[in-house]
Amino acid sequence: MGILIGLVVTLGCVLGGFMAMGGHLHVLMQPWELVIIGGAALGTFFVANPMSTVKDAGKAIGEAFTQAVPKEQDYLEVLGVLHSLMRELRTKPRNEVEAHIDNPEESSIFQAYPKVLKNHDLTNFICDYCRIIIIGNARPFEIEALMDEEIHTIKHDKLKSYHAMVAVGDGLPALGICAAVLGVVKAMGALDQSPEILGGLIGAALVGTFLGIFLSYAVVGPIATKIKIVREKKSRLYVIVKQTLLAYMNGSLPQVALEFGRKTISAKDRPSIDAVEQSTLNPGGEKKAA
């Protein structure tokens, strides 16, 4: 919603200001200039990026438009599943705990937290490090280094679509100039026409420059920034898991270890201690109540 409001405000001010200066909107209606710029941008996007990044960029744009960042319930479910697993690690034999992490889709623990189970990458991240804890040979500082490296890799992969969009945005002004040059070439072929016709052709060519700059700084650039914000917030879920499990490995009780994870959530989005306690005592309760 925020992106749509911003685009409406931007277009309204730009076009409204142009009309207030005495400009005519029909002059800006140059669809073939847009075809040249948009087609070139799309083509170079496919050239520069593997298909996996192209598909992920579409997904990332959808996440940006829907503001698909973790909400309080997402954080509560992550903390809840971690609490349940840590409690199992403390009280149950190894083979019973392994049943949960080897097959999370069939695990009663993960089924109680469907949002975590739906996030396959996060589920695998949790299970991998719980498995390492069960083995018991690695020391906490070694696990921390490994987690940091994996989280860095995850962030890098999640931000590939952002970097791809930034590259497109950076190239749009130049593509706008290309469209303008082609328009000028067309105008030069009509030098024998009247000044009115020649002026219209030159004006149409300059629209290409306007479109390239406008699309770069008012559309693609801001959307790319929104993608980065959304993806970075989603990556915080991995930091919560890291801090919680490290605290547990260093000897903290499960409920205390949750505080280490909870404190990594930004103050604006952080659930209260009471909400965390209620979520851990009543797994899936909010979902059933709804």
Image (tube, grey):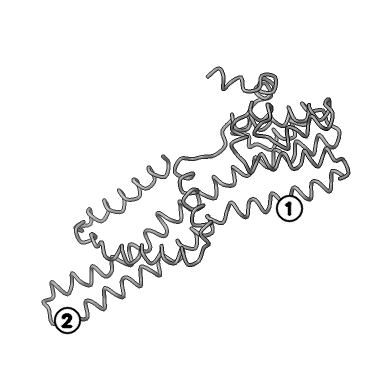
Residue 52 placement (x, y as % from top left): 53, 56
- From the viewer's perspective, is 194 left or right of 117? left
| Secondary element type, mark 1 | helix
Residue sitting at the far top: 289
| 163 lies above or below 279 | below
Dot 1: few (<14), some (14–19), or many (≥20) neighbours within 10 Å? Answer: few
- From the viewer's perspective, is 260 left or right of 51? right
Q: Is residue 80 visible?
A: no
Q: Is residue 179 visible?
A: yes
| 281 lies above or below 80 | above
The residue to which callout 2 is attached is 191
- The three-letter code of the residue at mark 1 reads Glu
Residue 91 placement (x, y as % from top left): 83, 25
| 248 lies above or below 59 | above
Q: Quadrant of residue 94?
A: top right
Q: Residue at x 32, y 63 (%)?
A: 210
The residue to which callout 1 is attached is 149
